Amino acid sequence: MPSNFQLRVLRSHSGRGLFAQERIPKGSLIVEYVGRPATAKQIRENREKYLFWTSDVSMIDGNVPANIARFINHSCAPNCESRIRNRRIYIFALRTIQPGEELSYDYGEEYFDLQLAGNCRCAKCSK
């Protein structure tokens, strides 16, 4: 079960992002990425922004109001990682995250190629 860390959606270098409002220790389970089951068409086309594979054959659509984790942006030098357990997606801290720091994880090669078209705007690549 995710901890009850104080998180806030704020402006970011790539639109809106999710920011820590308190220190988050390394290894902490921060938040669950939630959504509704993706439709057959969404799975087949795999083009929408908030889709997340939960297994080899199942996917969720995270574009729902209850999913604050959808505001976590991609980074090539992330401070978080996603882990799938029993078809549920959890976001963990890879290192200690300081108050005011934006949360990020690596979206993976498939998303990078489909959605970002090889043009990464993360803080590491924008330098």
Image (cartoon, grey):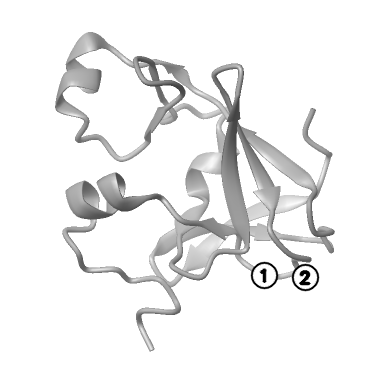
Q: Quadrant of residue 45?
A: top left
Q: In this figure, which residue is indicated by the disc labeled 2?
A: 98
Q: Are marks 1 and 2 in contact (CB under 8 Å)?
A: yes
Q: CA distance from mark 1 to mark 2?
A: 6 Å
Q: In this figure, which residue is indicated by the disc labeled 1?
A: 101
Return the x and y of residue 52 as percentages of the image width and height.
40, 31
Return the x and y of residue 22 as percentages of the image width and height.
83, 61
Left or right: where 112 falls relative to 34: left
Residue 27 vs residue 52, the one in the foreground: 27
Quadrant of the snapshot with the N terminus: top right
Q: Is residue 61 above or below residue 28?
A: above
Category of crowding for the residue at label 1, using alpha-carbon neighbours closer than 10 angstroms: few (below 14), some (14–19), many (at least 20): some
| Residue at figure coordinates x 20%, y 53% from the top left | 113
Amino acid of disc 1: Glu
Left or right: where 26 falls relative to 57: right
| Residue at figure coordinates x 46%, y 56% from the top left | 106
Left or right: where 73 falls relative to 99: left
Q: Quadrant of residue 56?
A: top left
Q: Is residue 105 above or below residue 118?
A: above
Q: Hey, which residue is sitting farthest front in the picture?
A: 56
